[in-house]
Image (cartoon, rainbow, N blue to C red):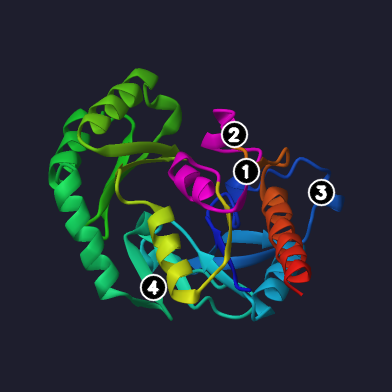
Amino acid sequence: MTVLVASDLDRTLIYSAAALGLTMPDPVAPRLLCVEVHESKPLSYMTETAAGLLAELTADPSVVFVPTTTRTRKQYQRIRFPGRPAPYAICANGGQLLVDGVPDRDWRRQVAARLAEECAPLEEVHQHLLSTADPAWLRKARLAEDLFAYLVVERDLVPDEWLKSLTRWAEDCGWTVSLQGRKIYAVPRPLTKSAAMHEVARRTGATTTLAAGDSLLDADLLLAADAAWRPGHGELADAAWAAPTVTALATAGVLAGEEIVRAFAQEAARLGRLDA
């Protein structure tokens, strides 16, 4: 039996310094491992315990670990996870499927055809973002892999009504809006992590899928998995989002990441015992 483990990365498996959520006294804080460096500076972390658990999990030949992220390929490839390198990775919210680090051209063509058929063009959405965003709180506007757009903002200054209006406008265009930290994503509705996860499951012959994620862009992934977990922070937690096959953790911050890896390992071991 092959178990596929598809996990979101930022604020699910790995955490920036600002997202660690360490509330305990410093002397008892968990030891951290830096797993990403950007511009010669440490950027993302896991607890050392989580890193050890992940290394053990990926060493199991019956487990296929699939990092699953909205990050671009370039952003994803900065990360250095412990353990065996992931043979597959899902980037750009499902728009890029990497096989041994190389983009799968057939998958990209399938995605492009579906987007052209089902939703408004990227340029139209990008121009709408630029024309409606206020320079007082807009810091950067970016396109990712020619698939979706995002803004880097001063979150506290963004009017809630603007975000609601953007969400309504995007829905009419076949797009989805998600707020994650200081980034506002506009993503085509057909561009999903779950579709890419199903493709990897087909290629690997996985009989069971496990998943984790914290944002609205992860909801389809969690629902598509046989079992899933979400941390006690993020868009899904804020919305009290729930589903029968999704475990809502109370733990928040980097310790939630550790709990998620432990849950993956325990469930994979349980399934292995059942198969035996």
Residue at 23% x, 27% y: name it: 169
Q: Quadrant of the N terminus?
A: bottom right
Distance Cα–Cα, label 3 vs label 4: 39 Å
Looking at the image, the residue that sits furthest to the top is 161
Q: Residue 9 or 246: which is nearer the viewer?
A: 246
Q: Secondary structure at mark 1?
A: strand
Q: Residue 120 or 28: which is nearer the viewer?
A: 120
From the viewer's perspective, tell me whether residue 93 is left or right of residue 211: left
Please check the rendered image and state whether residue 172 is part of the magenta-colored stretch, yes or no: no
Q: For the residue marked with disc 3, what is the amino acid?
A: Asp
Residue 242's disc number: 2
Q: For the residue marked with disc 2, what is the amino acid?
A: Ala
Image coordinates of residue 43 in percent, x first then y, are: 54, 60
Q: Are marks 3 and 4 in contact (CB under 8 Å)?
A: no
Residue hosting label 3: 26
Residue hosting label 1: 246
Residue 98's disc number: 4
Residue at 48% x, 43% y: name it: 219
